[in-house]
Image (tube, rainbow, N blue to C red):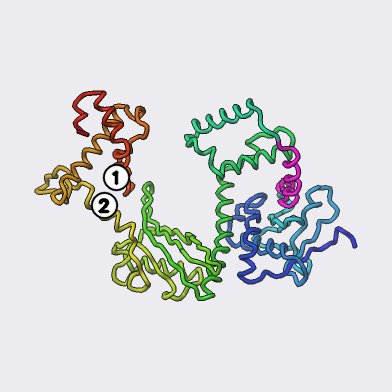
Amino acid sequence: MDARNTQYYAPICGPSSDRTMNALDDKMVDVGIGSSSASSKPDMMKLKNAIHRSLQKGGFGAQFVLKEEKASSAQCWLRFAHVCHTDGTPVKEFDSGYVACTKCHVVYTYEMRHGTSSLNGHRCRLVAANAGAMRLFATTVQPTTSQKRQVARAAMMMCCEDLRPFSIVEDAGFRCYSQVLLDIGISVGRGMKVDDLIPSRFTVKHQVIGNAESLHDVVKAKFKEHFAEKMHAGFTVDLWTDSIKRTSFMSITSHYIDNAFKQHVRTLQVPPLHDESHIAVRVLKAFKECIQEFGCDENERCVVCSDSGLNMCGGEGIQTNLKWLSCSDHKIATVLTTVLNKTTTTTNGIKSAPFYKFEDAGPEVFELIDNCKELVRHVKQSNLQRALKNTLKQENATRWNSLLRMLKSVSRSYEEVSNLLLNKGGTRAVLIA
């Protein structure tokens, strides 16, 4: 048989369970390399995923076949073949043809007029995994002190120029990214300009969108499988507003346990609520649309946990239509902020001084809180923190438990702070007398 006419068969895509089994393979489908801007369209991504999954399965009864390029001088055609229907006609959808790697079945859009640069740049994950593992195992060396110093200086410059935290060098994603660059450098064996290798922000954006759409289908298939087995699930719902653009969002997160008693927590949607009132009926409608998309049509199998705002538990809202639980964290936060935060009143247009609403119920407690705040403020402003073994923590208005954190820090360093202030002298020592 002529190798140039060899056809690779792939079966018709299976049900949702097959899509779930091939979730990891979905991640390997190319999203934007070598394709036009249309590659980010959901329909094109779905077609690419369908082709990829089919080719991964292999065998007869195929929906797609791979047909190798006729005699060509381009080296890429030794590793790539055209995607065709079973009758041999090339797949032409969205004004583009399609090719795939004959090893790992990564799918690319291809038109002759665009050339083969993207195909030449393809690194087959199967070939690279075997070759790379052997190469790294055989040639891994320890960096020299000079090389470590160079990298440390480059990291310092990155943090200073780009205003990044020093901890970025410890992040798993940054280390994985750096390892890919090292592996590419080893495989090339020659110098390379970073501007030719590093993707633009728009390419990264397209990669994120494409992979998100691909993985969304995987999560949806998992959920439909879970609800098909008549299982229950819990949901947490919250409304919040972006502090920069002032756009409101509604986050919906699911919590469920599968048949293997493994807990899963997944954020299903964070849809923006543009120019819409956040009344209870609207929130309920958005929630039902979300869970129906993921295969849940029976309200009695859903338990929802949220705050006690009227947009959540108001009439004709989530509380009256679904099993609902009030969020304990929100209640605790409300109690603490109401009792322990100072408030003001306005009478005849005159605003009062800040005061504790419930100070009469425990004046000693509120006096202690004020003294601790003043103590921490003085220690920080006087630059005395360096002299303490354990630094004092100031209250943070955005964290509901930061007051407790502050009081604990003062209690832990009480004797040390007392001795420090007494040795320094001055009237501030009376704060802890």
Q: In the rendered image, is residue 248 in sight?
A: yes
Identify residue for label 2: 336
x and y percent of residue 374 in the render?
A: 23, 35
Residue under the point 39% across and 58% down: 274
Q: Is residue 413 left or right of residue 172?
A: left
x and y percent of residue 138 in the render?
A: 76, 40
Give the amino acid at mark 2.
Leu
- Taking depth in this image into account, of 57 and 81 the one nearest to the observer is 57
As drawn, 230 above or below 406: below
Question: Closer to the N terminus: mark 2 or mark 1?
Answer: 2
Q: Quadrant of residue 352?
A: top left
Q: Is residue 166 left or right of residue 365?
A: right
Q: Secondary structure at mark 1?
A: helix
Q: Quadrant of the C terminus?
A: top left
Q: Is residue 199 left or right of residue 325?
A: right
Residue 403 is tagged as 1
Mark 2 and mark 1 in contact? Answer it, CB < 8 Å: yes
Task: Say few, some or many: other residues with alpha carbon within 10 Å of mark 1 (under 14 / 14 to 19 / 20 or more).
Answer: many
Residue under the point 23% across and 52% down: 338
First to last magenta residue range: 116-140
- Taking depth in this image into account, of 128 and 405 the one nearest to the observer is 405
